[in-house]
Image (spheres, coloured by chain):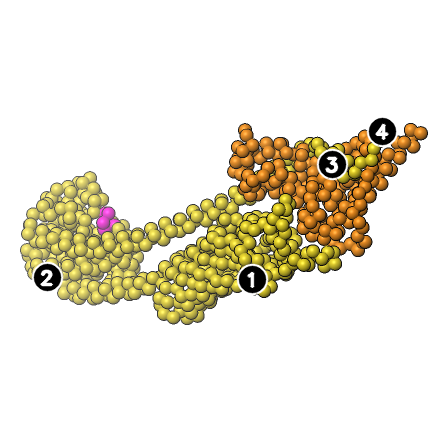
Chain colours: A yellow, B orange
Amino acid sequence: MSEKKNIDKLFKEQLKDFEVAPPEAVWENIEQELHKDKRKRRVIPIWWRIAGVAAALLLLFTVGNTLFNTNGDNTIEQEVVDTDKSNTNSINDSNDVTNPSDLNTSNNQDKNPIVDNDSSKNEEGINNSSEQLNDNLTTTDDSTTKTNVASSNEDEKKSSSKNSSLIKNKSLKENAVANQNNIKLNTTNKDKTKVSIDNEKNAVVNSSNTPRSNNNIDLNPVKKEKSEIDKLIKKTTSSKETQVTSANNSEKENGTTTIDTSKTKDVFKEENAIEKAIVEAEQNKDEVDETEAPIKRWSIAPNIAPVYFNTLGKGSPIDDQFINNTKEGDINVSYGVKGSYAINKKLKIRAGINKVDLGYTTNNVVAFSRPSSSGSSRQLQNIKLHDTTTTFISANSISYTTGPEILFTKEQGSIDQQLGFIEVPIEVEYNLIDKKIGLNLIGGFSTLFLSNNEIYSVQNNGDRALLGEATNINDMSYSANFGIGVNYNISKQLRFNLEPTFKYQINTFNDTSGDFQPFFIGVYTGLSFKF
Amino acid sequence: MSLEQLIERCKKNDAQAQSQLYKLYASKLFSICLKYSRNYAEAEDNLQDAYITIFKKFDQFKNQGSLEGWMKRITINTALQRYRSAGVFDIINEDQIEDVSVEVDDDNISIDFLLNIIQELPDRYRLVFNLYALDDYSHKEIANLLDISTGTSKSNLARARLILKDKIEQYKARPNSQSL
């Protein structure tokens, strides 16, 4: 039995309930593809995290560094005040109190460098009274220190021959010298004392050795103590400069090597030397200040740039059919601000925030309307259209001979894609030439946050209509940046910058047709202010 | 899990839900792929691409209309996309023929055979026949979809029918001659 039947109907009925289970491999492939995508998405956030950590560390380091620096200055200033006061105090004390055992105050010990200085001079002045001094010391407690010795010497001297006010003045001056030595441990000591070694050690040993010598005295019998003090006095009388003396005082080995049997010097002469030293120290201090002050590490630079967007490959961000269409990158504007920190003279790290607009035009696109009742959806691959009744096809794929319908309704124009990003660049700037006109290389990364995503239809007659938005643009993407910077130093604070920069975009589109590798070029100009 | 829940979870890229959704419609969509493709291997690729598109663009499914319809449309579009980019619809200078009604004897013809002869059709005939005869697209819609004129669409449909008829008749003639 057979009857004639419409062939369409036959196929439709037969295939109506036709279902075939696909092979397992298909789902495996799909799963793999979906996961691959996830993996790709995960990799970049890790990079972002690393960059974030690096940026945070940098910030911490720089902020910490500046804080530390200012702290250091403060404490030094405080020290100056403290030592001044306490020293005059201690000297006053020693003037007032004649009993050497009472002089063993912690104040004196703390201020040992200055007191040591005093002692050495004093001792020089009173080498005659060394025996008496020894006696003094041997009768004192175990805790007697060199500073005590010094103080007692001072007292002795005062009581015997010297004008106490002169000594006081002298010691005050020395305080100043010593303080300056504290601030800049180098230079001043070096100049003052002919012995250039162990300036720092000098200061350090001075402060740390007093208790040690205390211990020594504690442990050793009186006899040894006495001999040590003898030695000490010898040393002080022989050495020319106060700093050296104090160093010798505190360090036995040093002392033995530098002991000399030169003659004692006049207090007067020594005073001259000290005054000279003070002047020198002050000069040194000024010099040091001058060299440190002008390093301005921070700068801020507002900038503006024309940016040109294009692709390295031949492709379309919109749809397969537009791969072969002619396309044009638009020129837009980017503006923002950058802050930079100079790690050293050559290298700067900089970060900022920029608004970037990019535009890309696909030409030779035919737009035509079709009935809205149409059930089919002939949509562009990567665009979510607001108005689904319009269809866009590439003029390249239209055959003008095939049918009149399209030609009647066709209007040839272009599709204009407008993208806006907030760009956060993190870059390194390396100085090649650092003169009045400078040259540097710039490299780094930017993170781009999508802020604007619009697609317009532009007709040949200039009509422009919002079509919708692209669906294949990631909210967050990246760019690798390379640039050359030319700058002109207008003044110490102000600099003019011109930085043509190439930014290769990464992960901007998640689904493009053909080989679409977007980039943008910007010529960033602006002024940077150093502070 | 209801379909609504499944859809919501798929929108959140839930792997388990995606797997479930795949299983739910795989057979149906694979049959579409088989009809629109030249062979089994191509159909596999097609199904794979279609599902990837479905999952990637799942947030675009607005719950208007059936999910099945939406997925079917994507599957068909994926199949068409393949030939569109391959330039199948480039101009072919052939005379356009009239839309003809073709009738054949309604015997027991296996589905496998019907599928075979559909797959054997030249691409541009197969797609038009599928769209018009099996999936109820109008000639105008087909013209839009394939970037061809409605005239071409009609002509292609007529040629497809004639070829299919020939094949069915040949098929019938063979067992008959054997039985004689």
The crowd level at tag 3 (other Cα within 10 Å; few <14, some 14-19, many 20+) is some
Residues tagged by mark 4 and mark 1 found on one chain of the structure: yes
Q: Label 2, on which residue?
A: A166
Disc 1, SS = loop
> Could you classify mark 4 by the number of other residues whose Cα lies within 10 Å: few (under 14), some (14-19), or many (20 or more)?
few
Provide the residue designation for mark 1: A463
Residue A59 shown left or right of residue B104 in the figure: left
Q: Determine if residue A424 is in view.
A: yes
Between residue A4 and residue A417, name the one nearer to us. Answer: A4
**Sequence-earlier tag: 3 or 1:** 3
User: In whole angstroms, how far apart are the C-alphas of marks 4 and 2?
Assistant: 142 Å
Q: Chain of mark 2?
A: A
Task: Report the chain holding disc 4.
Answer: A
Closer to viewer: mark 4 or mark 3: 4
**Between residues A276 and A302, which one lies in front from this camera angle?**
A302
Query: Residue B120 falls in which quadrant of the image?
Result: top right
Residue type for callout 2? Leu
Looking at the rendered structure, the kind of residue marked 3 is: Lys
Magenta residues, start to end: A205-209
Query: Residue shown at 43%/56% (left/top)?
Result: A353
Picture residue at 12% right of the left edge, 55% below the top: A88
**Mark 2 on the same chain as mark 3:** yes
Do the residues at pointers 3 and 1 share their chain?
Answer: yes
Residue B41, relative to residue A370: is it above or below? above
Sequence order check, earlier mark of 2 and 1: 2
Residue indicated by mark 3: A12
Q: Chain of mark 3?
A: A
Q: How far is disc 4 from disc 1 in space, using C-alphas? A: 65 Å
Residue in the image at 59% along x and 32% along y: B20
Residue shown at 82% from the left, 35% from the top? A4
